[in-house]
Image (cartoon, coloured by chain):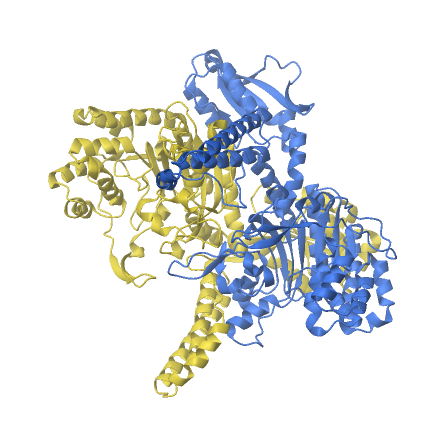
Chain colours: A blue, B yellow
């Protein structure tokens, strides 16, 4: 009895995973409905079986048998917080990656690839409280290893290893990183997720690399068509200056900074409470901080802060304000000032930032009610964001934890980064055992959350009915199948670099071949026949697919119902000269 | 004392890693020489320090202090069997990947992406003895996970999960896989390495998908320019038939098959010894096997085997021979027969193959003395390969193991695969608990070893002096730096999709800017000046780089020593109309 319950529960889990997979990959509704129906039936069966088991006194005696069976079975699913990406999604993901990589090289970047795991000591002490989210490998008689948590630390390790041989670089990395976080798959928050990083290392003149990186993010987000976006910018030294001026004790600066970091999710009252009740800050100090961090704006905010004599007398703040002034000049040259919001509440958690910090937000990634680039009025208090609700839940180890009510949170920032001038030096010093090591290399970088971008772009692709395959030509034959002839022609086209396919059957019926080509939305159907082969020509039908009322519809070229007779020897040139071919090459199809 | 010895040893290890890194990335000889020199000095210091420590009675008392210091230090290196790939190598690797992916889509493939780790039970029982090479993750209060060992098992898991929704597919995967093997970095044998897989699933007419996959491998290897190559093909059912006909007991067939698999590395005498002495096979049976497995050839070998009445009376062999006959017909249609060697000694280790099996070998990947595609003479005995020498070494756990003398072995096959008709069904059956599950989906696929291909292609790139960056334009300014003007122009070009860069300094000297552009081998130098800006034009110098006596030399376009005056508003069109631009687009630079 127990074993059949177990089998049902496993089957339900498998079907659930399948349902999720199909739903996310935008499968056809009929298929989805079928799986859903099956899922319903299984759940009903489980209910009945449980009811029966409850009234069945022999249930306990069957448990050993159940355990034995259990061992033979396997659960067909991907690990928690991970998933497969099938063909249609990957077509879109590859497109997103291609644009990002192309922007990276357009800005002079070169690719770096590091291993997916690092020696555990490399990651140690870099992520503060979040270190608990690091995936460790089992020690199998060798080294202690961990999966990489981001691309920044491996990059810093690489730069430290290269030492003085090449300190000035523009490097990009695209790949997966790993965090044992609470996954929210629908919002692109996963345990395995893709990040695209771009970093500029080395000593350059102030704020020039900083402006390069911010201009790059603007270029990428514009090209990806993610909708309106804002780059929030702040400066660690301005924040530190504010804390000093307001009277925060030196040993409380980092912890008060992380309280400020929560202002994008919590109202000021809650943050103040954390500062005073939890962290023991004097309420009047907190109020002074509140006056500063409510500001957001552009260059005019900078003027206002320079005019603040208390702040501009502080060495740290003064340095930060001067950096910001230079940055604004350069961002104006790059023509991206309209995307920028100097946001004094932005703090960013990671300890290693030393200069400017930034986050890109798009409307689609923000919590309900958020508007990108709201009209700036520095004198007004910030609108209170929706209050975040939390609930107590049990984690994997059975401990109670607070969990965020995800309906109140967006997918978060889609890109973030900052300047980190000491991280590489930390590695050089730790490796040489000399704290005064000369291996310090200043860096600035950005991490782009590809899954979050994909979560925004993908529904638009589905809506527009974008093709998910690049096959251009489908080779078919009437009558006896002409398999070898189809093979010869498909190979000829492929050798010429034309994406072509055919049905892997010996004598398929013509309508079956047409259906196969149409499933791939192939624009050219090339038909072979005995006569055609003898006389050295083929028949070609051209077809387009268009979205009509949310459904894909085939549209034959005018007067092309019967197809066109094309000389076999000229087929490749003929195909490339058609309007459909040109439209495809220009990305219009 | 112990702590300074320790520091020296660590420093030597770090320098060793750096030296290796630089050497593999083809760094300039001067830099290499410097690192080598430093390494030499360190080793001498270590020797002296050790000599001193030996005569120093206080060495022991210092050990506690040494241990404390040791804890603070970290070793700057990548995990064993892994490495970073820097910009120049990645440029070449990305090129290789792009060609492989392009061929995959040209053959009608769609991309699949699965997580880098799987639930441990998914990998269990799929790799026979090699299961010990699987990397496991630490169980951190959740699931038991392992890094993927190949792409085939995750694909089969995916197909089983998708169930009956889409059984016919052509899917490709490109990504890293993990094996705790003994790494030989110089030959591209790593613990983390890249594989590119292409698999056709579903019921099709016999041998058509099989021919597609083999034609695909030929297309890829031809495009990658890896030199002469051979695809060795055999059939599991022919092998099984031979073993039956020769009189191998049923329970010994798999183990005798894995002895045969070693014939590409060991002479027949050694293999026979393993069969008879280790595995207890009757010597006369072994001799009969030896008569069969020495054959290699083309369709004519097939005729010879059909004429062998004993073999063709065996049901298994007959089925295999018929499959091979059909395959040869199709491979002839694909025009790749000249690349094929029907090799009866090819056995392949993995248990799950059920039909044809194949391996691609190039001369560059073979052991010393190997020639791809030797003239076929089925009557002659195969030339004895060089005898492999093994030596006893200690593994990570301190156990003694036999290690292969790597100088006698090539990088091995660069691609391999076969038909596996039951693997997906195994998953479906194991998940449903029903051995007669209808979830069986026949598959055939190929795995391409990208690191091995890279190890062949990379030295040719270095030799040809191929650029490692795509930046086309370097923006410079004379006099006062004109930083904002340079930024405006670089942004304008980048917005037009032109890869452009500039020196991130406020007032750099002109020769420094030229040197920076030349380091990237940028073909266009665009120079701004006060007058030029006022009058609305720029100066452009065109330059090519050519290999002369193994060194890169700059060649200015004729009459272009002073550069050309170009209207600022027409710069983008002007650049795109130049011969250098067209040559670059056509891949000639």
Q: Which quarter of the rendering shows the N terminus of chain B?
A: bottom left
Residue at the spot x=35%, y=39% of the render?
A65
Residue closest to the eye, B482 or A475: A475
| Observer able to see residue A296 | yes
Residue closest to the eye, B276 or B454: B276
Residue closest to the eye, B499 or B509: B499
Q: Residue A437, how many percent across, how many down?
A: 57, 75
Q: Residue B152, how many percent across, how many down?
A: 42, 39
Occupied quadrant, residue A427: bottom right
Q: Residue B290, how many percent across, how many down?
A: 18, 39
| Observer able to see residue A205 | no
Residue at the spot x=53%, y=44% of the render?
A82
Task: Say if A418 sits above or below B321 in the image.
Answer: below
Task: Say if A476 sits above or below B501 in the image.
Answer: above
In this rendering, position of residue B200 left or right of residue B468? left
Occupied quadrant, residue A26: top right
Q: Residue A86, how many percent across, how many down?
A: 53, 36
In this rendering, position of residue B541 left or right of residue A518? right
Q: How many marks?
A: 0
């Amino acid at each position: 009895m127990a074993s059949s319950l177990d089998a049902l529960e496993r089957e339900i889990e498998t079907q659930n995973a399948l349902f999720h997979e199909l739903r996310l990959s935008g499968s056809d509704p009929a298929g989805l409905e079928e799986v859903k129906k099956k899922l319903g039936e299984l759940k009903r069966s489980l209910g009945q079986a449980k009811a029966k088991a409850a009234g069945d006194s022999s249930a306990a005696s069957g448990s050993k048998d159940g355990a034995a069976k259990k061992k033979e079975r396997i659960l067909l699913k991907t690990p928690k917080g991970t998933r497969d990406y099938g063909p249609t999604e990957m077509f879109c993901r590859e497109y997103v990656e291609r644009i990002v990589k192309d922007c990276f090289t357009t800005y002079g970047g070169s690719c770096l690839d590091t291993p997916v795991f690092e020696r555990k000591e490399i990651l140690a002490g870099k992520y503060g409280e979040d270190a608990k989210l690091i995936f460790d490998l089992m020690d199998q008689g060798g080294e202690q290893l961990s999966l990489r948590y981001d691309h920044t630390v491996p990059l810093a390790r690489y730069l430290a290893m290269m030492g003085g041989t090449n300190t000035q670089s523009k490097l990009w990395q695209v790949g997966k990183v790993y965090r044992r976080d609470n996954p929210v798959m629908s919002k692109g928050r996963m345990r395995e997720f893709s990040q695209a990083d771009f970093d500029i290392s080395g000593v350059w003149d102030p704020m020039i690399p900083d402006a390069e990186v911010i201009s790059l993010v603007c270029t990428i987000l514009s090209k990806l068509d993610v909708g309106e976006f804002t780059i929030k910018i702040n400066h660690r030294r301005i924040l530190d200056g504010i804390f000093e001026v307001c009277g925060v004790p030196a040993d409380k600066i980092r912890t008060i900074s992380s309280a400020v970091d929560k202002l994008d999710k919590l109202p000021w009252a809650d943050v103040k409470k954390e500062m005073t009740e939890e962290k023991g800050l004097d309420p009047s100090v907190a109020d002074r901080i509140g006056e500063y961090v409510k500001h957001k704006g552009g260059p005019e905010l900078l003027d206002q802060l320079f005019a603040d004599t208390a702040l501009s007398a502080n060495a740290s703040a003064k340095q930060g304000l001067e950096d910001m002034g230079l940055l604004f000049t350069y961002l104006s040259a790059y023509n991206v000032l309209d995307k920028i919001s100097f946001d004094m509440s932005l703090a960013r958690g990671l300890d290693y930032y030393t200069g400017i910090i930034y986050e890109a937000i798009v409307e689609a990634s923000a919590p309900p009610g958020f508007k990108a680039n709201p009209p700036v009025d520095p004198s007004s208090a910030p609108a209170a964001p929706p209050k975040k609700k939390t609930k107590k839940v049990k984690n994997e180890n059975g401990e109670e934890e607070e969990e965020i009510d995800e309906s109140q949170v967006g997918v978060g920032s889609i890109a973030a980064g900052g300047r980190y001038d000491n991280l590489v030096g930390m590695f050089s010093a730790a490796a040489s055992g000399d704290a005064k090591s000369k291996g310090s290399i200043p860096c600035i970088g950005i991490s782009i959350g590809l899954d979050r971008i994909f979560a925004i772009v993908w529904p638009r692709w589905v809506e527009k009915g974008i093709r998910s395959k690049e096959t251009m030509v489908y080779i078919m034959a009437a009558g006896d199948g002409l398999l070898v002839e189809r093979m010869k022609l498909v190979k000829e086209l492929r050798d010429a670099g034309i994406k072509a396919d055919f049905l892997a059957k010996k004598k398929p019926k013509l309508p079956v071949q047409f259906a196969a080509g149409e499933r791939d939305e192939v624009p050219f159907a090339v038909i072979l026949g005995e006569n055609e082969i003898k006389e050295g020509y083929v028949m070609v039908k051209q077809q387009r697919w268009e979205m009509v009322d949310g459904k894909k519809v085939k549209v034959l070229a005018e007067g092309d119902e019967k197809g066109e007779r094309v000389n076999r020897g000229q087929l490749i040139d003929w195909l490339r000269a058609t309007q459909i071919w040109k439209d495809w090459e220009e990305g219009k199809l």
